[in-house]
């Protein structure tokens, strides 16, 4: 990720360790996605082998981990930083 916003120059790393909380957000998102995929596989494939379920869930989570990483940091910034920005600087 960029250290500073290319549009307005905002420094994303507000304080040291600020984004450690985003790990918990990311964990919650991955658990939710894993549950949805697991239940979907159970219903669609009529209770597949556990290795099939683990393989599919692992492959999907590896493929979407970069967007989850960025989304969890974005959620952390929007909901926990209390930083106000000027919309006119766009």
Image (spheres, rainbow, N blue to C red):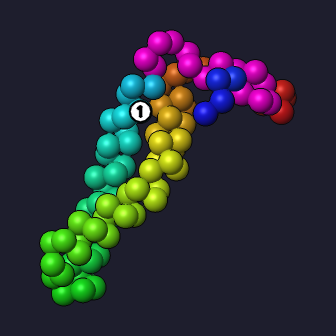
Q: Quadrant of residue 83?
A: top right
Q: Closer to the camera, 75 or 56?
A: 56
Which x, y percent locates residue 5?
72, 27
Which residues lie in the magenta part? 5-18
- Res 73 seen here: yes
Q: Is residue 64 left or right of residue 32?
A: right
Task: Decide whether the magenta segment is chiefly helix, strand or loop.
Answer: loop
- Which residue shows up at 76% across the image and 21% down it? 9
Residue 36: x %, y % from top left: 30, 66
* Quadrant placement of the N terminus: top right
**As drawn, is 44 to the left or to the right of 46?**
right
Q: Quadrant of the C terminus?
A: top right
The residue located at (29%, 76%) in the rendering is 40
Residue 15 is left or right of residue 57, and the answer is right
- Vertical side of 49 occupied by 61: above or below: above
Q: Secondary structure at mark 1?
A: helix
Q: Nearer the viewer, residue 29 or 16?
A: 16
Label 1: which residue? 22
**Residue at 38% across / 57% down in the picture?**
61
Q: Is residue 6 magenta?
A: yes
The residue drawn where x is 18% and y is 81% is 48
72 over 63 or under it: above or below = above
Name the spot of residue 44 as percent of width and height, x first. 27, 85
């Amino acid at each position: 990720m960029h250290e500073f916003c290319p549009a307005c120059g905002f420094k994303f790393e507000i304080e040291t360790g600020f984004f450690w909380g985003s790990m918990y957000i990311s964990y919650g998102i991955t658990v939710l996605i894993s549950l949805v995929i697991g239940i979907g596989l159970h219903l669609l494939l009529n209770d597949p082998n556990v290795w099939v379920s683990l393989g599919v869930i692992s492959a999907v989570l590896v493929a979407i981990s970069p967007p989850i990483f960025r989304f969890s940091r974005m959620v952390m910034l929007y909901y926990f930083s209390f930083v106000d920005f000027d919309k006119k600087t766009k």
